[in-house]
Image (cartoon, grey):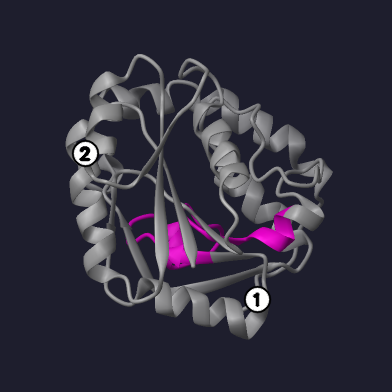
Amino acid sequence: MISILVPVLGRPAYAQPLVDSIRSSSAQEHEILFLCSPGDGAGFHASCETGEHVILVNWKPGRGDFAKKINRGFRETTNEFVLMAADDLRFHPGWDTSVLEIARMTGAGVIGTNDMGNPAVWRKRAFATHPLIRRSYIAECGGTGEGKKGVVLFEGYDHNFVDRELWDVATSRGQTSFAIDARIEHLHPHWNKGEMDATYEKGLRQFAADRQLYLSRKSLWGKGLTPRE
């Protein structure tokens, strides 16, 4: 079974279409866990209305909110595979079969999926925005530059580069592979697939500072290796 973790902030209209997309495209057993913020009553209510699992976290949606929610979701689930998802995704048929097959073939701890937007993802495979993560890998090695066991994402970024650090660290350990046929489309305004809103603006406001922090942390995991095919 795959645990699909969905951090939520605003965008109540996104909840049901996301669930419908997952349900209609998935062939493997899965669970969906929404992680909502206090004060976001509309997002919480819409998530609950889907009938899926919902957690209301006990912190305000400030710095590191996405990373904190993914880490919380990881702790609240037990399945061997966890998908680092979001509410602005469209899942395409066969995504789960494809990514689980690559996971089985390679044994990698972090398996990239095709977001159908970012050229660094679908062409260069330089990192993955919404990867499948193996629980035993995080439990044994951790996903951050510090290598703290049981922690998926570094919570020090405002929002950006958490996915890049997870990928870089795993790559430096020879623990990445890529499932190019696992299409999880990112409906982001950068790819002309969505409208800019307050949640996107919040996520982008500290991009430059997050980038500098990411560059300053790269010495923790070194140059890195080529991902496994």
The spot of residue 105 in percent (x, y) is: 61, 85
Which amino acid type is shown beneath numbered disc 2?
Glu
> Who's the residue at 25% across and 40% down the image?
189
Q: Is residue 224 visible to the viewer in this orientation of the structure?
A: yes
Q: Farthest bottom residue?
A: 105
Secondary structure at numbered mark 2: helix
Count of numbered labels shown in the rendering = 2
Dots 1 and 2: beta carbons under 8 Å? no
Looking at the rendered structure, the secondary structure element under dot 1 is loop
Relative to 58, say whether 193 is above or below: below
Q: Nearer the viewer, residue 117 or 60?
A: 60
First in sequence, mark 1 or 2: give its number.
2
Question: Which residue is identified by label 1?
Answer: 228
Q: Position of residue 181 (x, y in %)?
A: 39, 77
Q: Which residue is depicted at the point 63% across and 55% down?
A: 167
Image position of 201 (left or right of 216)? left
- Residue 65, percent across and down? 51, 27
Residue segment shown in magenta: 112-138
Name the amino acid, label 1.
Answer: Arg
Q: Does the magenta-highlighted stretch encompass residue 137?
A: yes
Which circle marks residue 49 in the picture? 2
Res 42 quadrant in image: top left
- 224 on left or right of 70: right
Q: Is residue 44 left or right of residue 62?
A: left
Is 181 colored magenta in this rendering? no
Answer yes or no: is residue 161 visible.
no
Q: Residue at x 72, y 44 (%)?
A: 144
For the point 20% across and 46% down, which residue is it?
16
